[in-house]
Image (cartoon, rainbow, N blue to C red):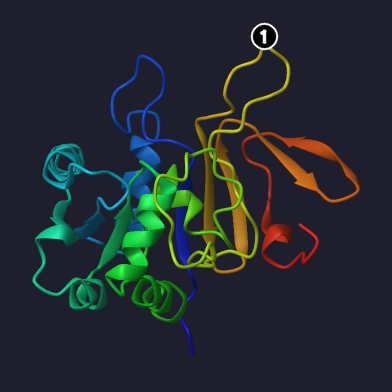
Amino acid sequence: MAAPRRLLLLSNSTMYNGEFLEFAADTVKDFFKKSATKRILFVPYARKDYADYAAKVKARLGEMGFEVDSIHEAADPVSAVKMAQGIFIGGGNTFRLLKTLYESNTAEAIRIRCLEDGMPYMGASAGTNVATANICTTNDMPIFYPPTFVALRLVPFNINPHYIETDPDSKHMEGAILKVEGNHAVLLGNEAKLFKENVDPVYYKPGADMSFLLTDTNA
């Protein structure tokens, strides 16, 4: 029997004038510690500078009490995924990220670990994009072309982490977090806007139960 999926999907990793993961620090710590995760596998594939990105994440998550291994340093990335206690896929360019996940043969390995073993998965920005059904709602420039736009499918819907309202006076709807545990999903952080075909968009406040998204095929 498959273990319940455990996902923490962040719209972004840094708020304006804030530090890296500052706005989500308590949520991140609680999320991984709830599953007794002490060591996290970081995936820097969304950016070109793997080493610098990994060093930044190691320092920040280290402050939270976690040890971090970066997948780009592993001799066998697939084995690294299979052995991981938890995983964090960071932001950058979504096309670059998905292409590299497929090229390294880690996409399916991550999907299996998350959906069958219940390995905790945290994504930020592009890392949240690839956790969804596909990457067709990304704002990123297609500087690379993955073999398919189909993503990890850890949830059956799409997310635009950097949605911009059409109102010129509004700001990015960032700082939102979707936490998924099994078939339960809750919105944390800031508000989010839900779009469905042939239905007016709906705003949801932090604390809203979003579990219906996991089973609603029209979501």
**Residue drawn where x is 16% and y is 45% of the image:** 54
**Residue drawn where x is 61% and y is 33% of the image:** 163
Depicted 214 relative to depicted 4: above or below = above
Q: Nearer the viewer, residue 206 or 97?
A: 97
User: Are there few (<14), some (14-19), or many (20+) residues within 10 Å of tag 1?
Assistant: few
Which residue is most to the top? Answer: 169
Q: Indicate left or right for 149 with 108 as reference.
A: right
Which residue is most to the bottom? Answer: 1
Is disc 1 placed on a helix, strand or loop? loop
Residue 33 occupies quadrant? bottom left
Q: Please give the residue where the numbered disc 1 appears in the rendered image.
A: 169
- Residue 195: image x %, image y %? 77, 44
Tell how many labels. 1
**Residue drawn where x is 41% and y is 79% of the image:** 112
Residue 169 occupies quadrant? top right
Depicted 112 relative to depicted 140: above or below = below
- Look at label 1 and name its amino acid: Asp
